Amino acid sequence: MRTTRIAVSAAVLGALALPLASIPAASAATSVSSCQAKPLPYTVHAKAVTIRSKASSKSTALGVLYRSHRFTVQKNSGNWRYITDTTTGVKGWVSGTYVYRDVAMCLD
């Protein structure tokens, strides 16, 4: 009984490994290198996020970053992002919990 299980397991694993072994290395490398995904811009994933003077929820509030505002991220510190709100010109820290990049996928 045990030898039958081992034989069946080996046959299944061999059948799964066969298609992977038949892929040429050049075609696998080509598909990875042909995908040139550019990083997406940061977006606000809440109605509004408070812009703070320091990377702390207890620091002074400088403004509010709304979902419709455009902004750029200059640097990161832990889970905080130093941003410039290009809509209002306010610079400060926002929590990375609410501000992050969307994910892009390449399907070649």
Image (tube, grey):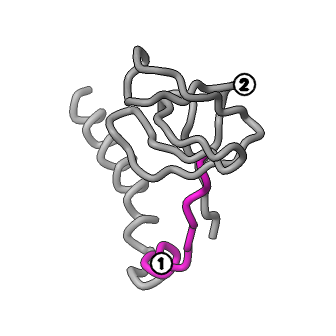
Q: 10 Å neighbourhood of mark 2: few (<14), some, or many (≥20)?
A: few
Task: Tell me which residue sits at (38%, 29%) in the image.
Answer: 55
Residue at the extreme left of the image, as rendered: 3
Give above or below for 68 relative to 108: above
What distance separates the C-alpha of mark 1 from that of mark 2? 38 Å
Q: Nearer the viewer, residue 102 or 68?
A: 68
Task: Tell me which residue sits at (22%, 35%) in the image.
Answer: 3
Residue at the extreme bottom of the image, as rendered: 26
* Left or right: residue 52 compared with residue 38: left
- The percent coordinates of residue 15 (x first, y second) are 42, 56
Q: In the rendered image, which quarter contains the N terminus?
A: top left
Give above or below for 85 relative to 56: below
* Left or right: residue 63 compared with residue 91: right
Question: Magenta part of the protein: which range?
Answer: 28-42
- The percent coordinates of residue 59 (x first, y second) are 41, 20
* Tag shown at residue 33: 1
Q: 10 Å neighbourhood of mark 1: few (<14), some, or many (≥20)?
A: few
Give above or below for 91 relative to 96: below
The answer to whether the residues at label 1 and label 2 have Cβ atoms under 8 Å apart is: no
Q: Is residue 58 magenta-colored? A: no
Tell me which amino acid carries mark 2: Lys
Q: Which residue is mark 2?
A: 47
Tell me which amino acid carries mark 1: Ser
* Left or right: residue 102 compared with residue 16: right
Q: Nearer the viewer, residue 93 or 28?
A: 93
Q: In the rendered image, which quarter contains the C terminus?
A: bottom right
* Between marks 1 and 2 in the image, the one whose residue lies nearer the viewer: 2
Q: Nearer the viewer, residue 24 or 10?
A: 24
Q: Is residue 32 magenta-colored? A: yes
Task: Tell me which residue sits at (33%, 39%) in the image.
Answer: 77
- The percent coordinates of residue 71 (x first, y second) are 63, 48
Secondary structure at badge 1 equals helix
